[in-house]
Image (cartoon, rainbow, N blue to C red):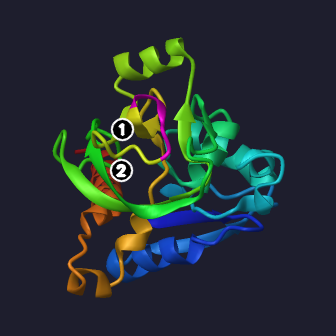
Amino acid sequence: MIKIGIPVFPGSNCDRDVEKVLTTLFKVKTEFLWYNKEKISSDYDAIIIPGGFSFGDRLRSGIIAAHSPIMDEVKRLAKDGIPILGICNGFQILVESELLPGALIKNDSLKFMCKWSKLIVKNNKTPFTNNFKLNQTFSIPIANGEGRYVADKETISNLQKKNQIVFQYQENDNPGGSFESIAGICNEKGNVVGMMPHPERVFEKLLPKMGLPQDALKIFGSLTNYLGKSMILKTKIRRGY
């Protein structure tokens, strides 16, 4: 059975949302992992770092969480190729942990923004985007005050050349003023993905009744699809096929 770890920090507030989506809709096993765990087992198939305000966003968003004991373990798993997803504050933590390049700073409006936004899938080869078509657009909620992705010219150029830009905001819908309208990126291997919008917030059954889409759930569907195929492959290898 697929097993996904959800690191929890003081101030995390989307951990239960992620857990509910994974267990209720995709029927996978989840475990909450407290931030001060110095060792976690290697039997996790993926790690999802949820949104929130870890450590109250003291100093700057994600920086204290990035130096928490559990992140050494997340780095180890990332190095081993385990899929890692950081959502909103989770993205900030991945950047501050140097698992992803660049920085996330205050929105150019200097305001907290909570609204629906449109994303374009620019890389559908990651464990979190394989159920999307390339350049597919979909609606998704955002909720952040420091969601503006920035990086130097060389980093942006490398992201473009190596297909590491996973999501972009649709033209004229770049809520925080991110460079190149970047909403999500991945590492060179593609197994570590960070995104500012909140796919876990489109789960409730009430949303379709309100005319609101749930396409963002394909991010979690992509992951379970990827992990399911990986398990089948591992089984075949063990059996000598």
- Residue type, mark 1 in image: Val
User: Mark 1 falls on what kind of element?
Assistant: strand
- The image position of residue 235, as x and y in percent, is 32, 54
Q: Which residues are magenta?
A: 176-180
Instruction: Describe residue 232's horizontal placement relative to residue 19 as left or right.
Output: left
Comes first in the chain, label 1 or label 2: 2
Of 175 and 149, which appears nearest the observer?
175
- Residue occupying the point 44% across, 56% down: 197
Label count reads 2
Give the quadrant of the N terminus: bottom left
Q: Does the magenta portion include 177?
A: yes
User: Mark 2 falls on what kind of element?
Assistant: loop
- The image position of residue 110, as x and y in percent, is 62, 48
Of 115 and 233, which appears nearest the observer?
115
Of 104 and 27, which appears nearest the observer?
104
Residue 37 against residue 26 in the figure, above or below? above
Magenta stretch: dominant secondary structure = loop
- The image position of residue 44, as x and y in percent, is 54, 59
Q: Does the magenta portion include 59?
A: no
Based on the displayed image, in which of its 4 quarters is residue 31 positioned? Answer: bottom right
Instruction: Describe residue 230's horizontal placement relative to residue 6 as left or right.
Output: left
Residue 229 against residue 221 in the figure, above or below? above
- Residue occupying the point 46% across, 80% down: 20
Q: Report the residue marked by disc 1.
A: 166
Q: Report the residue marked by disc 2.
A: 128
Is the residue under label 2 in contact with that under label 1 (CB below 8 Å)?
yes
Any part of residue 77 in sight: yes
Instruction: Describe residue 188's horizontal placement relative to residue 96 as left or right.
Output: left
